[in-house]
Image (cartoon, rainbow, N blue to C red):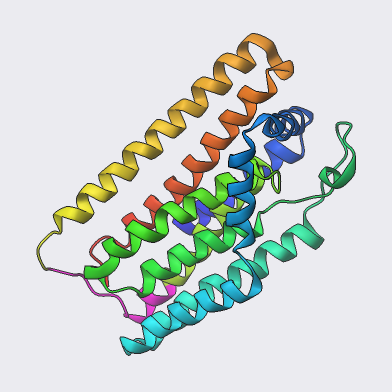
Amino acid sequence: MVAAAGFVFAAVVYVLAVLTRAGQTIENAALRGADQDDVSETDAAWHALGQITVYSLAAAVVAVALVGVLRKRWDLTVAAVGVIVAGQLVVQVLKRWVLPRPGLVEVTGGYAHNSLPSGHTTIAMTVLFAAIIVVPWKWRGVMLFFVLPWATAIGQYTLTAKWHRLSDTLAADGIALAIAALASWWLQRKGSLTVYTGPRRAGRVVLVVFWSLIAAATLALGLILWGFSLAGEGLDADEWVVYLGAGTFASAGSLLAALTFLACWRRIH
């Protein structure tokens, strides 16, 4: 069900944002609004995105695989590495050869080509999901403390750096979640997953509650920013406000995808 929901969500995002004039107009306004962001924020975004290379991706795959090997859990290793690799295969094929971007509004330069789904967001989210799969339950909270903020930030950074639109990030969240859910379903079918019956870890509960509140707050803020702006000014809404709303939606999308997958793996190892 989660896998199906992820793919359907990505498809709906594509239809609404790419195949409609209103969707393209709003997202292009967000891109122009990003020009008004502080230079330090833009530099930070470029630096963070620049850290994601073929070599860093390979290092992440090796790290994930190493955890599985040390646990002597080859099934988890295959599933976790498969999530990262399959994520890139799927999004690159979709972005480059499958999904068109019709020219419904006037736009020039590199923004005219299709950029959905975001490869960088997919990398960040699939690495997070792979880590959830392969890291032992008792260490999962520690992993989340470091990896979840990074994965969430990458999606928002793609907008700040103007590398991607909001729809690119949201579609990547949905696809990454769907692929990770399919991998988990395969593990369940194999009988590889067991329930942890030990005591609850208070620190992890606090961490999950904290990020849940952040997800709710960012989603609400995005609705407020876009709701008032678009209701009052329509498609001519202030570009800076549209950009801020898009950024909060990007963060909320990544957080909600992460929390959904984490809920599926609650007390599972």
Residue 1 visible from this viewpoint: no
Please give left or right for residue 5 compared with residue 107 in the image: left
- Whole-percent x and y of residue 67? 37, 81
Figure check: 261 above or below 166? below
Q: Quadrant of the C terminus?
A: bottom left
In the picture, measured across the screen, residue 18 lies left or right of residue 246, that is right
Magenta segment includes 4: no
Q: Decide: is 195 above or below 221.
A: below
Image location (x, y in percent) of residue 237: 69, 17
Q: Which quarter of the figure has residue 17?
A: top right
Closer to us: 11 or 33:
33
Taking the magenta stretch, the answer to whether it contains residue 194 is yes
Q: Position of residue 91 (x, y in %)?
A: 67, 62
Q: Quadrant of residue 213?
A: top left
Q: Along the horizontal axis of the image, is 103 left or right of 2?
A: right
Q: Is residue 34 above or below residue 124?
A: above
Q: What residue range appears in magenta?
A: 186-197
* Number of numbered discs: 0
